[in-house]
Every structure is written in C-alpha cells, then in structure tokens.
Image (cartoon, rainbow, N blue to C red):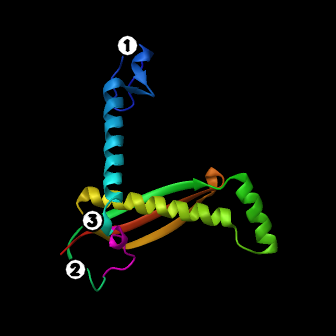
Amino acid sequence: MPTCASCKQNHFGMFELKGGFCKKCAAAIEEDTQTRKKRSADLSSRADLAKMVLTTETSSDLVVTERLGIVSAECAFGMNVFKDLFAGVRDVVGGRSDAIQKTLRDSRDVVLQELRVEAYELGADAVIAVSFEYVELSAAGNMVLLVATGTAVKLG
C-alpha cells in the first residue's frame, strides 16, 4: 500500500498520492509555501531592509534590546560545464570570470533574503553579526554551498 511521506499513513491506491504526499498533506505543504512567499513579499516591501542585516555586532544608531536567536540560510548552487570551462581558461591566462562572480553574487542575494525571512518570522527587527561560509561539495560534482548565519535581534 502507498504511504504518505509526511503523515506516514497508508492509502488505498497509488492515485491518492501526489508527489508522495496524500491530498491533506500536499495541501498543507502548498499552504505553507504560499505563506512563506507572502512573508517574503511583505518583507521585500519594507523600507528599512537596508539596515536590517549587519556583519557587525553593533552599530552606532542601533540599540539591541533582545537577542532572539541564531538564524541561518543555505544555498547550494552548481557551476555548469561552460562556466567551468571558461573558468579553467581564465585560471591559465589570468583574469576574472564574470559568470562565476554572478553566480556567487546571486547565491549571496538568495541567502540574505532567506535570512531576512527567517528573522522576520521570529519577529526580529534586524540580523547582526552575519557571516558567510562557502563550502565546496566535491562529492556532488561542481557544487558549492553558501551558508549565512547571524543573530536575530529586537531593536529599541
């Protein structure tokens, strides 16, 4: 009998499952996805985003009143064959690889946005002491993992 990947309940007939989930669990997952997208859109419309993420612990114009906890975001991205081919040429002859730099910049934007969303869900006003770590996932081929962490805080 087919089993739902979320609630682990058996279902009669494989057509009752969609993508490995029963209708009830699939609807809950879709609702959660829509809620996260709405929160992300709400957050993107806020005017104070520029000072919401800091790489420093303190700032002269921000007073931290409460630390809510550590927040983190991850982004795994691949370097395709053509980017790698041109990067290899650049490595030999020297120069910058615009394609790889754009991929790194895009992944940084993704993790920062996810960091903001996670902090927003905690009720934070800012994320301080943000750090980035790039990890090469050699077992997965040409994949790189970017992890951003910081401390979600309330401001006074």
Query: Please, what secondary structure does the residue beneath circle 3 have?
Result: strand
Q: How many marks?
A: 3
Would you identify the image quadrant in which residue 29 lies? top left
Does residue 122 belong to the magenta stretch?
A: no
What type is the residue that disc 2 sits on? Val
What type is the residue that disc 3 sits on? Gly
Callout 2–callout 3 Cβ contact below 8 Å: no
Question: Where does label 2 land, which residue?
Answer: 63
Residue 105 screen position, x and y as percent: 55, 65
What type is the residue that disc 1 sits on? Phe
Left or right: where 70 falls relative to 149: left
Q: Residues within 10 Å of mark 1 (few under 14, many from 20)?
A: few
Circle number at residue 12:
1
Residue 79 screen position, x and y as percent: 65, 56
In 3D space, how far apart are the residues under numbered discs 3 and 1 (Cα atoms)? 44 Å
Question: Is 3 or 76 nearer to us in this picture?
Answer: 76
Does residue 57 belong to the magenta stretch?
A: yes
Circle number at residue 69:
3
Q: Which label sits in the foreground, 2 or 3?
A: 2
Query: Please, what secondary structure does the residue beneath circle 1 have?
Result: loop
User: How would you classify the magenta stretch by its main secondary structure?
Assistant: loop
Q: Earlier in the sequence, mark 2 or mark 3?
A: 2
Residue 73 screen position, x and y as percent: 41, 59
Magenta residues (range): 49-58
